[in-house]
Image (spheres, rainbow, N blue to C red):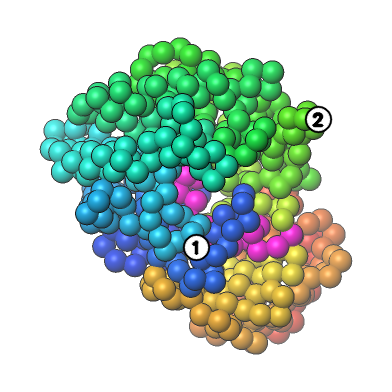
Amino acid sequence: MDSVGDGISRYLSWISSWKQGKGIYGGLHVHSCWKVSSVLEKKYQGVTVSEYFGLIRGFLNLYSKTGYEYFLLEAKAMCDALCSLLGSDGCFEHSVYEFEPGRGGCIHNALADLALLSFAEALVDENKDPDPYLKTVEKNFEWFMSYWWKRGNAWLKNPSFPCWCGVTNQDLAVCWAMALYGELKDRKYWEEYGSRVAYWYLENYFLPEYRCFLRGDEPEFPEPAPYHGLISYELVELYKLTGDSLFLKRALDVIEYLYENSWIDKYGLRRIHHNIDLKTGRVSLKPSLVTQGSLICALEELEDLGVDRFKEFKEELVKTLLFYQSGRGYFRNSTDFNNFFDIVSRMCPGEFEALTTIWRGGSLQLESEYALSIDFSGKYIWFDSDCCWELRGDNRAVYGLKHMSNGIFSGSIFGNKVQVSMKNNFIVLELDLPKYSSVCLDHVVDQNVLLRVKLTSPLKLGIKLWDGRRLCLDLSKGVHEISSSSL
């Protein structure tokens, strides 16, 4: 059984529901780590350029492993869309992720550059001209240097040291882009700026006693653990591009830090901690994000370099990611917020890239198994289908029509046709959905839970059990009481 291939198939089917035009993918850009959900208030669910980094690299991985030209053409369409989003000043439009719509984000522009550079690298391998995409990157670099060089952030304005925004994970992404551009076209940006910035962070923001990095936008505050996953990926890639073992050494330090502070949840799954308090040395385990795509990519790259001591760690993280994946293909964010930040489906292209990176090839099924998914956390309930989504909680509801970039509306699209409740060990689903032949309940059904399902028409119901099994139950019209312990 190819669990990774199944995970990729589910994701491909789901992400296609967010297509809003040629090469254009929308999504809900909530930020679970910082608890920012302003896109819901702004009613924006369109493109944001930083998400194209993982998407394009994932599609390129699939092209490399299947030879299926569709994946290359889709990557090209996304790159062409990125180029069309470059403003006349060299900054990408829609480059602020959780603060969309807007422009000017540091790492968001850098990740768009890395997406284009990854495609340019693939074109070189295909003996095709990468220059149109490299020109877009160079124009963005020029904007970077005029707008971001030593600009800093709200806490540290106009710093004297070499940097852009002054935040470790973000500036290292710019360094990676400049180093990769140097391999493909011209080393001037790396030699004059990127290398200076990268080595400054290694020498000044790395904390050897903890083996982690300071973040840089508030005093004595380390990068949260999920960002250290990204940093490890950036450092491994910088090692591959420069050959300097210091990048590799620091990447290994960071991964040791993440592994030693990781923990096992109630389902026996490996989880990454949240952060460490430098004053007390206390490690906070929660909230822990399930989505660790960048870290998985870094660990796979290390294995390719002959460093395999973290292989089991990688496999455990992949198991966690797949366990919490929806039957429709998106990824749960966490189990710890007890609100909608656990369940709102972000694009999670880094997790898609991770799965395509470790996948060994095979067949992919591109049709969705389920027409609707349901999940809940605290007082909030989440619904996802091909055409729409809905979030309920705090006596209000909001929904979105996926084909529209500004298609978020107040109210409920499903109304009383779907009712969900949970109390103690009792889950109740009331579904009046004659147009939906299959529904998956993505909330993990624990041991000794009673599931009561009331249907007005026959239905295939997918459920996920505490032990990792996924079952599809054929249910007739009527009321069904299902004990999880009997399954």
Distance from Cα at disc 2 to Cα at disc 1: 36 Å
Magenta span: 338-353
Residue 60: in magenta span: no
Instruction: Please give the name of the residue rendered at 67% of the width and 32% of the height, measured from the top-left corner.
Output: 220
In the figure, 378 relative to 480: above or below? Answer: above
- On the image, the x and y values in percent for residue 302 come to 49, 22
Q: Tell me the SS state at disc 1.
A: loop
- Say whether disc 2 or disc 1 marks the residue closer to the N-terminus: 1
Residue 64 in sight from this viewpoint: no
Left or right position of 9 against 411: left
**Badge 2 density bin: few <14, some 14–19, many ≥20, Cα 10 Å:** few
Q: Are marks 2 and 1 in contact (CB under 8 Å)?
A: no
- On the image, the x and y values in percent for residue 412 come to 58, 83
Q: Tell me the SS state at disc 2.
A: loop
Query: Disc 1 designates what residue?
Result: 28
Instruction: Please give the name of the residue rendered at 57% of the width and 42% of the height, measured from the top-left corner.
Output: 155
Question: Nearest the camera: 255 or 30?
Answer: 30
In the figure, 333 relative to 60: above or below? Answer: below
Query: Disc 2 designates what residue?
Result: 280
Residue 351: in magenta span: yes
